[in-house]
Amino acid sequence: MNVLRRSFIALEIITKIQISSTKSVMRKLFLSLLAMISFQFLFAQQNSLTKFPQGFAPNDVGKRLAYHFVDGRHELYAGRYIHYAEVCTWNGALDYAVKTKDQKLIKLLQDKFEPLFTREKPLLPPMNHVDYNMFGSIALKFYQVTKDERYKKMGLAYADTQWEVPKDAKPDEKAWADKGYSWQTRLWIDDMYMITVVQIAAYKVTGDRKYIDRAAKEMVLYLDELQRPNGLFYHAPDVPYYWARGAGWMAVGMPDLLRELPKDHKDRPRIMQGYLTMMKSLKEHQRPNGMWNQLIDEADFWPETSGTGMFTYAFIMGVQQGWLDAAEYAPAARKAWMTMISYIDERNNVTEVCTGTGKKNDKQYYHDRPRNAGDLHGQAPYLWCAAALLGK
């Protein structure tokens, strides 16, 4: 009887061990499966910004647009000075050329710039306006690629004069300077990019903290004055419309600054907050086909390509830097990019680009703005996206 009882006890113990062992194995299998699914999901999100069908690959699209830019004539302000939209496109083309190690393209872009040191020197923008001074950004980018001191000297002159108050400055310009801001401050939404792009470039070239401090201080001012609680931006304090390209300058300017801003910089949390708040709102306003409209929150306005390109760039940068959730924003960026390409015509011109637009407190004004094909306001952000999609 004792033997039988001991046998039953032994059998019970063995059964419990087997059940426990089975549960342990099942638990391990479940955790392994969960890890594998999570990895595959994460890989799929990352893959959505690296694998594209023929005709949509950033390498191919960037090549089409960059070489098209090389072949184009200068875009000028009233036939006099290099336009900031050309500078933006130049920057994008050069970024693309460096990412792809296209030495031929780099040389062609240099050749396009070289006459500005000599016979085309009169086309250089004067150093007296926010839209003009950002020209220095392309000179400083060329310096980073070539180490030719001529570019550095030219570019730093544009960066420094943004903060050097001229003798004939107006009272409001002097007032901004007295507060530590650029005397060129106007609180127009696009100025934020024009100011920070050249200051960031100067910081990258010199390592001088004053340049990045200037950019950050200016960015916080614009965030405080123009960003609304919903994360979007008015064109100007007295123009309460969410114009796509206007907001696009902030969408591009913030991640570009955050990428270079020291981790311990006092203004970094405020700028990151502004960026993340804007990205969340943009995600909510993205149209089903991936585009954004001329006025972001107006469903009956037309899809506009330059703003869409800028917002897409901001999503790509955020995913790559780990600031945005890849599962949410990578597919949104991909959807936008895939639709954007359909707006490039057979001449390699981006279509449906809102023409240059000053501020106006009139909703219909934004609805009726002309739409251009090949406008460099649109070519530039497409190139920025192509270069960004090629990796950090």
Image (spheres, grey):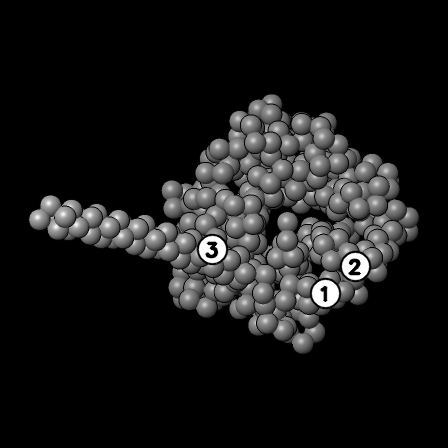
Instruction: Tell me which amino acid carries mark 1.
Output: Lys
Label 3 sits on a secondary structure element that is helix
Which of these two is toward me, 253 or 266? 266
Instruction: Tell me which amino acid carries mark 2.
Output: Asp
Mark 1 burial class by Cα count in 10 Å: few <14, some 14-19, many 20+: some
Which of pointers 2 and 1 indicates the residue nearer the eye? 2
Tell me which numbered mark, 2 or 1, is placed earlier along the sequence: 1
Q: Are marks 3 and 1 in contact (CB under 8 Å)?
A: no
Q: Residue at x 52, y 50 (%)?
A: 319
Relative to 362, does residue 71 appear above or below in the rendering?
below
Q: Give the CA separation, mark 2 to mark 1.
A: 9 Å
| Label 2 sits on residue | 102
| Label 3 sits on residue | 39
Q: Can you give x and y, in whole percent of width and height, for residue 16 in the image? A: 22, 49
Quadrant location of residue 227? Answer: top left
Q: Can you give x and y, in whole percent of width and height, for residue 85 in the image? A: 68, 54
Which of pointers 3 and 1 indicates the residue nearer the eye? 3
Mark 3 burial class by Cα count in 10 Å: few <14, some 14-19, many 20+: few
Label 2 sits on a secondary structure element that is loop
Q: Give the CA separation, mark 3 to mark 1.
A: 33 Å
Q: Residue at x 51, y 37 (%)?
A: 271
| Residue 63, numbered label | 1
Instruction: Tell me which amino acid carries mark 3.
Output: Phe
Q: Residue at x 42, y 49 (%)?
A: 280
Q: Residue furthest bottom?
A: 346
Q: Are marks 2 and 3 in contact (CB under 8 Å)?
A: no
Q: Are marks 2 and 1 in contact (CB under 8 Å)?
A: yes
Q: Is residue 64 left or right of residue 230?
A: right
Q: Give the CA separation, mark 2 to mark 3.
A: 34 Å
Q: Residue at x 20, y 48 (%)?
A: 10
